[in-house]
Amino acid sequence: MIRKTSNWMRAAWASLGSLALWAGIALAQSTTDPNASTTTSGSVTTTTTSEVWYGHWWVWAVGVAVFLIIVIALTNRGSGSASSSTR
């Protein structure tokens, strides 16, 4: 019983340490957009950004839907012929 508690505590501390590490890495990232370009013309500064196609949420939603359809189709591929061959 003590060994299970010891292993659980070790796993909990490792998980918290990993969480702290990843949070530190995330907070240390630069807040400037690397795709932004700044143009200065006189006293007017214009900043333009360009978005990549995989930055949109709907692209990921469509990708997940297509992936799930393919997985379901591949896993159910042989079920129809197995039931008819046993008659």
Image: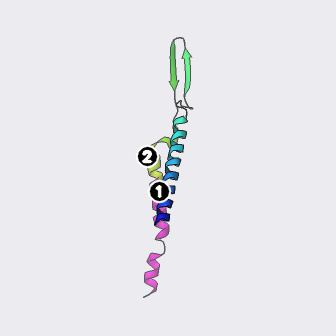
Whether 67 is among the magenta residues is yes
Q: Is residue 81 above or below residue 41?
A: below
Q: Please state which amino acid type lies under the numbered disc 2.
A: Trp
**Does the CB distance between marks 1 and 2 fall below 8 Å?**
no
What secondary structure is the magenta-colored segment mainly? helix
Tell me which residue sits at (51%, 24%) in the image: 47
Q: Is residue 45 above or below residue 80?
A: above
Relative image position of residue 8 (x, y in whole percent)? 48, 59
Q: Closer to the camera, 53 or 28?
A: 28
Mark 2 neighbour density, 10 Å: few (under 14) some (14–19) many (20 or more):
few
Relative image position of residue 68 (x, y in whole percent)? 46, 60
Residue with the most extreme top position: 42
Magenta span: 64-87
Q: Helix, strand or loop at disc 1?
A: helix
Q: Quadrant of the C terminus?
A: bottom left
Tell me which residue sits at (51%, 44%) in the image: 20
Tell me which residue sits at (44%, 44%) in the image: 57
Q: Please state which amino acid type lies under the numbered disc 1.
A: Val
Q: Closer to the camera, 36 or 74?
A: 36
Q: Helix, strand or loop at disc 2?
A: helix
User: Label 1 vs label 2: CA separation?
Assistant: 12 Å
- Residue 66 numbered mark, or none: 1
User: Which residue in the protein does label 2 denote?
Assistant: 58
